[in-house]
C-alpha cells in the first residue's frame, strides 16, 4: 500500500469533518435527543399518573356504587316498611269498619225484633180482645179496647 497525498488529504478532510461535526452538528443532535428523552420521560410520568388516577377513580367509583347500592337497599327497606304499615293500617280500618257495620246490623236486628214483638203483642192483644168480645157478646169501645191492649202488652 502506498501512502500518497490523496490518502493524507482524505484523512485531513475526514478529521475536519469530524471536528466540524463534533463542534457544530453534534450539539444540536445531542440537544434534540435530550429534548426527546425529556418529552418521553414526561409522557411516561404522565401515563403513570393517569394510571394511578384511573386506579383511584376505579376505587372511588366502586365505593360510590357500593354506597348507591346501600342507599337503594335502605330505600327498598323503607318502602317495604311503609307498605307493611299501610297494609296494617288498612287492615285495622277494615276490621273497625266491619265491627261498626256488625254493631249497626245487630242494632237493626234488635230494633226489628223489638218492633216485631211489639206488633205481635198488639196483634195478640187485638185477637184476645176480639175473643173476649165474642165471649162477652158485646163490643168494647175504642178507649177500653186501647186500654186493654196496652195492659195486655205490658203483661206480655
Image (cartoon, grey):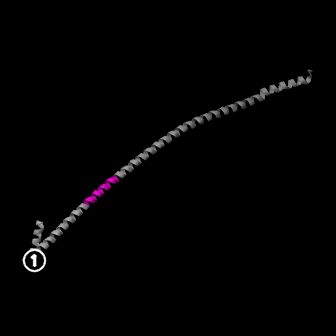
- Give the percent coordinates (x, y) of residue 113: 20, 65
- Give the percent coordinates (x, y) of residue 74: 43, 44
- Give the percent coordinates (x, y) of residue 77: 41, 46
Residue 140 visible, this orientation: no
In this image, 103 relative to 148: left or right?
right
Give me the residue at 76% from left, 28% from top: 26
Q: For the image shown, how many numbered marks are present on the structure?
A: 1
Where's the C terminus, which quadrant? bottom left
User: Is residue 94 inside the magenta stretch?
Assistant: yes
Query: What residue range appears in magenta?
Result: 89-104
Label 1 Cα neighbours within 10 Å, binned few <14 / some 14-19 / many ≥20: few
Q: Going by the picture, which residue comes out furthest to the bottom?
A: 138
- Give the percent coordinates (x, y) of residue 108: 24, 63
Residue identifier under label 1: 134
* Front one among 134 and 76: 134
SS at mark 1? helix
Give me the residue at 40% from left, 46% from top: 78
User: Is residue 119 inside the magenta stretch?
Assistant: no
Residue 73 appears in which quarter of the rendering?
Answer: top left
* Front one among 17 and 40: 40
- Up the image or down, 91 lies above or below 125; here it is above
- Up the image or down, 132 lies above or below 1; here it is below
* Front one among 136 and 62: 136
Q: Main secondary structure of the magenta part?
A: helix
Give me the residue at 80% from left, 27% from top: 20
Amino acid at each position: 500500500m502506498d501512502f500518497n497525498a490523496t490518502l493524507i488529504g482524505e484523512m485531513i478532510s475526514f478529521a475536519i469533518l469530524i471536528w466540524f461535526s463534533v463542534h457544530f452538528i453534534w450539539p444540536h443532535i445531542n440537544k434534540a435527543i435530550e429534548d426527546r428523552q425529556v418529552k418521553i420521560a414526561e409522557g411516561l410520568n404522565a401515563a403513570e399518573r393517569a394510571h394511578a388516577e384511573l386506579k383511584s377513580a376505579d376505587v372511588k367509583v366502586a365505593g360510590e356504587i357500593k354506597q348507591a347500592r346501600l342507599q337503594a337497599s335502605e330505600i327498598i327497606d323503607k318502602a317495604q316498611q311503609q307498605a307493611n304499615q299501610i297494609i296494617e293500617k288498612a287492615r285495622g280500618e277494615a276490621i273497625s269498619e266491619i265491627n261498626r257495620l256488625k254493631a249497626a246490623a245487630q242494632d237493626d236486628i234488635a230494633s226489628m225484633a223489638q218492633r216485631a214483638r211489639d206488633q205481635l203483642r198488639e196483634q195478640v192483644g187485638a185477637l184476645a180482645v176480639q175473643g173476649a168480645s165474642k165471649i162477652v157478646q158485646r163490643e168494647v169501645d175504642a178507649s177500653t179496647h186501647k186500654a186493654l191492649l196496652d195492659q195486655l202488652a205490658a203483661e206480655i
